[in-house]
Image (cartoon, rainbow, N blue to C red):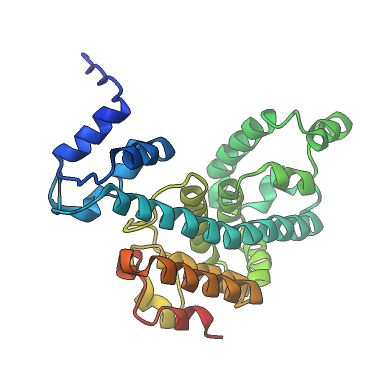
Amino acid sequence: MCKKHMEPAKTIDEQIQAFILQGLHINDVSRAEAILLDVNYYRLNAYAYNFHETPGFFIPGTTIEQLYIMHQFDSSFGLLLLGQIIPVELKLRSVLFNVLSLMHGNAAHTDIATVATDKHKEFLAFLAQYYEGLAKSLDQAFVSLNLADYGELPLWAAVETMTLGMISRLYGILNLENKRAIADHFNCDPKRLPTWLHLITTARNICAHSGRIYNRHIALKPKLYPELEKYNNPYIYKVLLVLKLLHGNSEGFRTFVSDLDLLFEKYGQDIDKAKLGFPKYWKSPLLSS
């Protein structure tokens, strides 16, 4: 099959001209050059459709600074979100280790008896992914030393080599007894928790790679409680609801809500909270006990 040739890379000047041809207003060429060296043209262009009058053409008067402001907002928002996701990730590693190792021993992550009977195929796929990742972690002392001593990592060490996605995947294939024992530590039921973990794993990947958050649809729909279901829209707000539930309305999460409020104050006139899925009174569902 004949493949298309890639277009040659555009210079900064050519990138600016491409924006101008789409109707973007460039007030200061030097400033535009600095922005495009700071942020990849194609990453910045991901925000363009928010300002399109017709596909491919900007609303008259739209500036490159407006695109850059959206990128800056997303970067700040993403860092705040990561600050709430990482503690959940760390707790999940600890809970998984403490529950499974005490119930099934230190090699529980390689024991097929820990998983649901209809998930054996998925368990083998998980093991393949786990050992592939382990091979890339041999430069870490706790990995090489444990492998030398035992030929396998004890669970406390194994969870430290797993990504959040892998831990979420492992939880999803455990049998009901194990799922329930872990979910209890998050004051959740084992049917809801996998959907929460899947969602925050997706959110973590977006934030960790500086992906676009603003006006981004996230197809995953977590199983929320009935009183929160009306907020279960396609945008990022549902991630905050899940984090609130996982954090248990902690002081740290309340501080996050305050920090987010300050971020909106900073970018208020440039950001439409509805394009993040935020309701008018967005703080109330996040702060209610």
Across and down, in percent, residue 238 comes to 42, 68
Q: Residue furthest right?
A: 149
In this rendering, position of residue 64 left or right of residue 224: left
Which quadrant holds residue 180? bottom right
Q: Residue furthest left?
A: 54
Q: Residue at x 68, y 67 (%)?
A: 181
Which quadrant holds residue 92? bottom right
In this rendering, position of residue 122 left or right of residue 65: right
Q: Residue furthest bottom?
A: 289
- Quadrant for the N terminus, please: top left
Q: Is residue 188 visible?
A: no
Q: Residue at x 59, y 36 (%)?
A: 129
Q: Does residue 67 sit above or below 139 in this rendering?
A: below
Across and down, in percent, residue 52 comes to 17, 52
Badge count: 0
- Quadrant for the C terminus, please: bottom right
Q: Does residue 102 sit above or below 283 in this rendering?
A: above
Q: Residue at x 41, y 78 (%)?
A: 282
Across and down, in percent, residue 127 comes to 63, 38
Q: Residue at x 77, y 54 (%)?
A: 104
Foreground residue, 29 or 139? 29
Foreground residue, 284 or 14? 14
In this rendering, position of residue 274 left or right of residue 25: right
Q: Is residue 232 visible?
A: yes
Across and down, in percent, residue 111 comes to 71, 45
In this rendering, position of residue 95 left or right of residue 120: right
Foreground residue, 287 or 178? 287
Foreground residue, 99 or 281? 281
